[in-house]
Image (tube, rainbow, N blue to C red):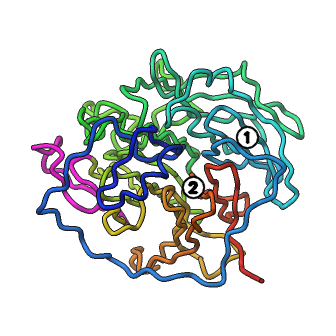
């Protein structure tokens, strides 16, 4: 995820939480400069919705005969009878089943490609299978490389066998995006219901987005991109969808679907509506959840969470509407320090969770459900599904879905978990 460097973490009023940040793969909160003091005039808004525990559910660890080295994402292989692939930050990919059997097998070993990739947020960031994987055996990767430092988005093919394995020699690079620093990579990728590939990229690093990349319409940093892997536009190795919001705008990169993100981590699409959701890791104050619309500007770094923030003397693109997050929580109330996306629950096993957005906080090990009003589409309360015990090594890096839409929670220490009904 994640996403932060092993520098000493500042937490304003939450100094005890700093111990968590000595080893996180999460999209988290890496900084190379000491934070500015919080202005005396800063006003923290009261909680917008009540929080309450959700009873009758328990977090259960899945049994495997191994640990997974900093798992960052989980993706289903279409047409492969529910088999999924887990991607680990340092380059290992395993195909596995989440049916309680503990079965897993190697899928791809990128260890050589990841040699020398050691910074906190560097490494593998995403994997996504083509919607027609059963026919074309194509899948897509997002990872970092050095010399020069860059994000790579590539296509690869798998064997046409009953137990598919990656064929590294078939890799085809689609995007090679220079990165100024080794943090705020973002990097999650996902196919939408429209069969387009969506790519989440962070703002390039440092505090306050000093280069203003997240708002700059001519760079890809701090954006969610949307490309067509099935076509080609000119000499590009991918296509620009004709209905992309800026496809015909000469002053905006045509790959951009939405802008104004700091360190987006956890793309997911609502299985019912197709709506795109994304969590965005904050700086000192706010962690946020966004419903992402085509062409929307989500504000960073002119805004932080739900409020305008004076990181810069002037807005980069003045007089533009900014999209508020669906929900934001703050470190100054002790709620958490690094958000982890996230999915809108549409499974069958937990009917009380229907339509709720399930997400977590990497630093505090809390798992929540954002209960939504179906009429307004806005949250009405935040349900606590799990709070970490002091002895429990649990730092969630992603809340993903299994092949049936049931939530699976990846944790940095190398375990996978399910939310289940508590029958004890």
Residue closer to the observer: 1 or 39: 39
Query: Can I make out residue 291 in this image?
Result: no
Q: Position of residue 128 (x, y in %)?
A: 63, 42
On screen, residue 253 versus residue 57, left or right, reads left
Q: Which residues are magenta?
A: 301-326
> Based on the displayed image, in which of its 4 quarters is residue 249 positioned?
top left
How crowded pointer 1 is (Cα within 10 Å; few <14, some 14-19, many 20+) is rated as: some
Residue 310: say if magenta.
Answer: yes
In the displayed structure image, the side of residue 102 where residue 174 appears, left or right: left
The stretch drawn in magenta includes residue 166? no
* Residue indicated by mark 2: 395
Quarter of the image where the C terminus is located:
bottom right
Mark 1–mark 2 distance (CA, rounded to whole Å):
32 Å
User: For residue 190, which numbered disc appears in the image?
Assistant: none
Q: Main secondary structure of the magenta part?
A: loop
Quarter of the rendering containing residue 54: bottom right
Callout 2: 10 Å neighbours few (<14), some, many (20+)? many
| Foreground pick, 398 / 33 | 33
- What residue sits right under mark 1 in the picture? 133
Q: Position of residue 326 (x, y in %)?
A: 37, 66
- The residue sitting at 21% across, 48% down in the picture is 302
> Which residue is more in the foreground, 145 or 352?
145
Secondary element under disc 2, as helix, strand or loop, is loop
Q: Residue at 72%, 80% (x, y): give it.
A: 422
Q: From the viewer's perspective, is residue 67 above or below residue 404?
A: above
Q: Position of residue 270 (x, y in %)?
A: 55, 62
Q: Nearer the viewer, mark 1 or mark 2?
A: 2
User: Image point 57% across, 52% down: which residue?
Assistant: 397
Residue 203 location, quadrant? top left
- Tell me which label, 1 or 2, sits earlier in the chain: 1
């Amino acid at each position: 995820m994640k996403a932060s460097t092993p520098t000493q973490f500042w937490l304003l009023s939450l100094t005890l939480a700093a111990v968590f940040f000595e080893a996180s793969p999460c999209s988290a909160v890496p900084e190379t400069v000491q934070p500015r003091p919080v202005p005396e005039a800063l006003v923290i808004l009261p909680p917008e919705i009540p929080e309450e525990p959700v009873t009758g559910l328990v977090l259960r660890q899945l049994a495997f005969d191994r640990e997974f080295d900093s798992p960052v994402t989980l993706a289903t292989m279409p047409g492969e009878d529910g088999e999924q692939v887990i991607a680990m930050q340092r380059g290992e990919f395993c195909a596995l089943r989440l049916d309680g059997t503990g079965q897993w097998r190697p899928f791809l070993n990128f260890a050589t490609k990841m040699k020398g990739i050691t910074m906190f947020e560097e490494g593998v960031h995403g994997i996504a299978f083509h919607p027609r994987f059963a026919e074309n055996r194509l899948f897509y990767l997002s990872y970092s490389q050095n010399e020069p430092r860059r994000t790579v988005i590539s296509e690869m093919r798998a064997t046409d066998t009953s137990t598919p394995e990656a064929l590294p020699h078939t890799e085809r690079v689609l995007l090679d995006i220079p990165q100024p620093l080794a943090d705020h990579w973002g990097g999650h990728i996902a196919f939408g219901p429209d069969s387009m590939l969506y790519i989440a990229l962070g703002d390039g690093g440092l505090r306050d987005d000093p280069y203003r990349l997240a708002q700059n319409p001519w760079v890809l940093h701090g954006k969610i991109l949307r490309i067509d892997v099935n076509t080609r536009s000119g000499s590009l190795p991918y296509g620009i969808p004709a209905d992309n919001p800026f496809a015909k705008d000469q002053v905006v990169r045509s790959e951009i679907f939405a802008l104004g993100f700091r360190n987006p981590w956890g793309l997911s699409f609502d299985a019912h509506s197709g709506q795109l959701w994304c969590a965005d890791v904050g700086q000192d104050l706010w962690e946020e959840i966004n419903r992402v619309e085509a062409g929307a500007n989500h504000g960073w770094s002119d805004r932080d969470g739900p409020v305008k923030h004076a990181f810069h003397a002037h807005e980069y693109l003045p007089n533009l509407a900014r999209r508020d997050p669906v929900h934001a929580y703050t470190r100054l109330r002790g709620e958490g320090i690094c958000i982890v996306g996230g999915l809108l629950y549409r499974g069958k096993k937990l009917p009380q969770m229907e339509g709720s957005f399930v997400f977590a906080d990497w630093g505090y090990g809390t798992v929540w459900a954002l209960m939504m009003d179906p009429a307004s589409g806005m949250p009405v309360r935040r349900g606590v599904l799990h709070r970490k015990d002091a002895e429990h090594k649990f730092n969630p890096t992603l809340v993903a879905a299994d092949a049936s839409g049931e939530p699976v929670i990846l944790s940095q220490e190398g375990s996978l978990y399910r939310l289940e009904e508590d029958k004890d």
